[in-house]
Image: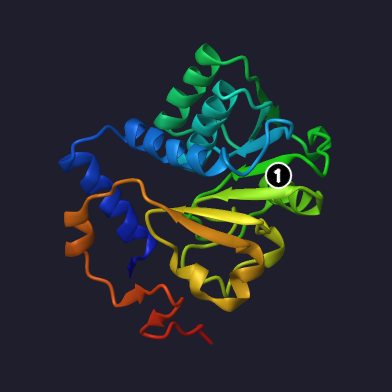
Amino acid sequence: MKLFRCDQIKQIDEYTIKEEPIASIDLMERAAGQLLRWYLPRFERSRSVFIFAGSGNNGGDGLALARLLSSNRYDTKVYYVDFTSNTSEDWKINLQRLKTETNVTLNYLKDIEQFPVISSGDIIIDAIFGSGLTRPVEGLAGDVIKYINSVDSTIVSIDIPSGMFGEDNTENNYNSIISADYTLSFQFPKLSFMFAENAQHLGEWEVLPIGLSGTAIRNTISPYTFSEKNEVAPLLKKKK
């Protein structure tokens, strides 16, 4: 399997949307369907689901999953980490679908004092940030990440643990990265998954295929490949 930088994955996404063709919101729905298929056989309906969503497409994935889980009779609660009002277009569409197709309420988390009570048997879905981060998380989002890490519940991160960079994390603040039990990455693992120092934040990670263009994958050049033996070639080296 080839490994790509996050900017290359974005280009492969865009090529798929153009050439398949498929609308970006439908590609997001495809990804949410894969998340649901992973989730259903693992967690009982007796366990409440708390989804923490950010403003971008990672948050949109979380809203789409919330709708699908609720439709499958899971007790689903959604908290929008309200550090900005600038949300993506697909996020807006999935919020409208959540409102019209389910009884799930979007709770606005404006202060850490509003953090919900979560029991050890509940499931936390981390959909705050995707892999496009380039600076450490601070402010309300950073506080929420630290609070989530302090809760004794199972944490599932969508695509990448929130706060983790897609490649080099040497300048990151590890105290502001979700420590997931499971990380579900779309189509490819991220390069950052290959570094031992990030393992404690990834938990068990798995790649979920979402049907990105085989042509784009073949034609995108990368020096990195990942084998079933968890070997990366060439050897990735941490910057000094």
Disc 1 marks a residue whose amino acid type is Leu
Residue 36, horizontal then vertical, whole percent: 51, 37
Coloration of the structure image: rainbow
Mark 1: secondary structure: helix
On-image quarter of the N terminus? bottom left
Q: Is residue 32 above or below residue 203?
A: above
Q: Is residue 230 left or right of residue 1?
A: right
Residue 41, horizontal then vertical, whole percent: 57, 41
Residue depicted at x 52% and y 27% = 68
Circle 1 packing at 10 Å, graded few (<14), some (14-19), many (20+), is some
Q: Nearer the viewer, residue 47 or 50?
A: 47
Residue depicted at x 56% and y 41% = 39
Residue 158, horizontal then vertical, whole percent: 53, 48
Q: In which quarter of the image is residue 23?
A: top left
From the image, tell me which residue sits under label 1: 140
Residue depicted at x 65% and y 59% = 177
Q: In this view, does 214 lie above or below 223?
A: above
Residue 133, horizontal then vertical, whole percent: 50, 56
Q: Is residue 128 left or right of residue 61?
A: right
Q: In which quarter of the image is residue 235?
A: bottom left
Q: Which of 104 and 72 is in front in this view?
A: 72
Residue depicted at x 68% and y 59% = 179
